[in-house]
Amino acid sequence: MPGVTRTGRSGLCGVDCGQPGDAVNCSDKQYEHKGRCCNRCQPGKKLASECNDTEDSVCTPCENGQYQQSWTKERHCTPHEICEDNAGLIVKRHGNATHNTVCQCRAGMHCSDASCQTCVENEPCKQGFGFVAAMAEARMTSPCEPCAEGTFSNVSSKTEPCHFWTSCEEKGLVVKVKGTNTSDVICESSRRSSLSVLIPITAAVVTCLVGICIYCLVHTDLRRRGPKQAEAEAPRELVTQQPEEVDFPVQETLLGGQPVAQEDGKESRIAEQEQL
């Protein structure tokens, strides 16, 4: 067989046979037997008989429920692993002639040790943390991890992963409230969002206009009432400013031998009358 050489007479199995004691070099898919190289059985088969001077190695398929995953000279295949339900194990991938059965822990459980022969209950992942199946399958003792940006978990669960925020854009909506690691995004329609902006602005503008109108009306009324009040107050001032009558002192004089009372300032006229 190519890659195998030895001196001596030619033999079967593709091997040159030589005298005892001669060096034998076999390939990785062969094995040495009684001074010759015999072929190994391919994956999925087991050895039934060794090669000899007249026959090559004889191989037969593995029985149902057994496997052989490499080139071998073994006469027995290996039984598939059994996933014990009582240990919390279930079948992840069924075995065949070349591969063993792969077990994993049931949902809500993880491997108790590196061999993963038994499973134990997961601790609930609290809010803001999600269950990671790959971590449980990798036999991690704590299959919970914090929710990354853009994901959330609002429950305490042994099986729930972190969920992605809702995409408002895909639904033709806009974001009203941004999501967190414990809550989803809250969406709203774009029309409602526009109204929520326009209404406060409109209210503010209307309030300003009303205030300006009230200011103008008050000051216009004051300007109109100003001159009328001045006219109404003017006569009062004039009345109060009129000079009071002056009472002249009364003096007694004799007129025709009779005393006559006269006010000061009237002497000249009385004197003139006397002269007449």
Image (cartoon, rainbow, N blue to C red):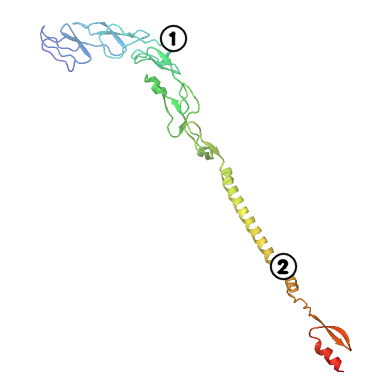
- Quarter holding the C terminus? bottom right
Residue pictured at 58% horizontal, 50% vertical? 201
Q: Position of residue 9 (x, y in %)?
A: 12, 9
Query: Are there few (<14), some (14-19), or many (20+) residues within 10 Å of tag 2?
Result: few
| Numbered tag placed on residue 229 in the rendering | 2
Q: Nearer the viewer, residue 205 or 82?
A: 205
Q: Residue 28 vs residue 96: left or right? A: left
From the viewer's perspective, tell me whether residue 13 is left or right of residue 124: left
Q: Residues within 10 Å of mark 1 (few under 14, many from 20)?
A: few
Q: Position of residue 242 (x, y in %)?
A: 75, 76
In the picture, the disc for residue 185 is none
- Which mark lies nearer to you, 1 or 2? 2
User: SS class of the residue under badge 2?
Assistant: helix
Q: Residue at x 62, y 53 (%)?
A: 207
Which quarter of the figure has residue 97?
A: top left
Q: Residue furthest bottom?
A: 276
Amino acid type shown at disc 1: Asn
Name the residue tied to disc 1.
86
Of the pair 135 and 206, the residue shown nearer to us = 206
Residue type marked 2: Gln
Percent across and percent down for residue 232 are: 74, 69
